[in-house]
Image (cartoon, rainbow, N blue to C red):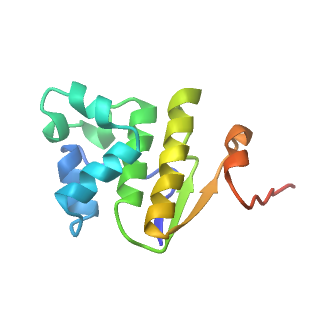
Amino acid sequence: IAALPQGSVLLSGSIRENFERYRPECSREDMHEALADAQLSEVIAALPDGIDTPLGEDACNLSGGQRSRLLTALAIAGNEPLVLLDEPTCGLDAKTAAALIDALFQRVQRTGQTLLVITHESSILKNFSQVLELRK
């Protein structure tokens, strides 16, 4: 299982260093594909040293949404049969959230993985074939 729990910690080094630490088996191509699927290509292009730019303590130099997307990229970069994402669209504008969800669905269709998402965002539920609603 690959998981993105809330409260995950990122290293203060670069995006590349986070991948080397959390996904040491990940090829350069797989890393860039996961980053693109997580809607980070433009963000990385704007960083002074791209994926080698230091992120600061717990990636404080990224916005909350960018940080969340980097954690998503780390979670989806592997080949685990189940990918569990907790609030992957939190902090994202509607356009970026929709692009992220679309890319995630395309990715799991391509890889054969199962995507399980925990969310409060009812707008993305239409994308899922099965939805479980938990109530008090």
130 horizontally vs 65: left or right: right
Residue at 81 percent of width and 57 percent of height = 134
Q: Is residue 93 visible?
A: no
Look at the picture and state if 109 lies above or below 62: below
Q: Is residue 6 left or right of residue 12?
A: right
Say which of 71 and 78 sits in front.
Answer: 78
Q: Is residue 17 above or below residue 94?
A: below
Query: Residue at 14% across / 26% down in the picture?
Result: 48
**Residue 94 falls in image quadrant:** top right
Q: How many numbered discs sit on the rendered protein? A: 0
Q: Quadrant of residue 74?
A: bottom left
Camera-nearest residue between 76 and 126: 126
Position of residue 40 in the picture relative to residue 133 (left or right):
left
Placement of the C terminus among the 4 image quadrants: bottom right
Furthest-right residue in this view:
136
Residue 95 position, x and y percent, is 54, 28
- The answer to whether residue 135 shows anywhere in this view is yes
Image coordinates for residue 97, horizontal then vertical, percent = 54, 36
Q: Is residue 100 found left or right of 76 in the rendered image?
A: right
Q: Residue at x 49, y 42 (%)?
A: 100
Instruction: Residue 21 in the image: state x and y as whole percent.
Output: 22, 61
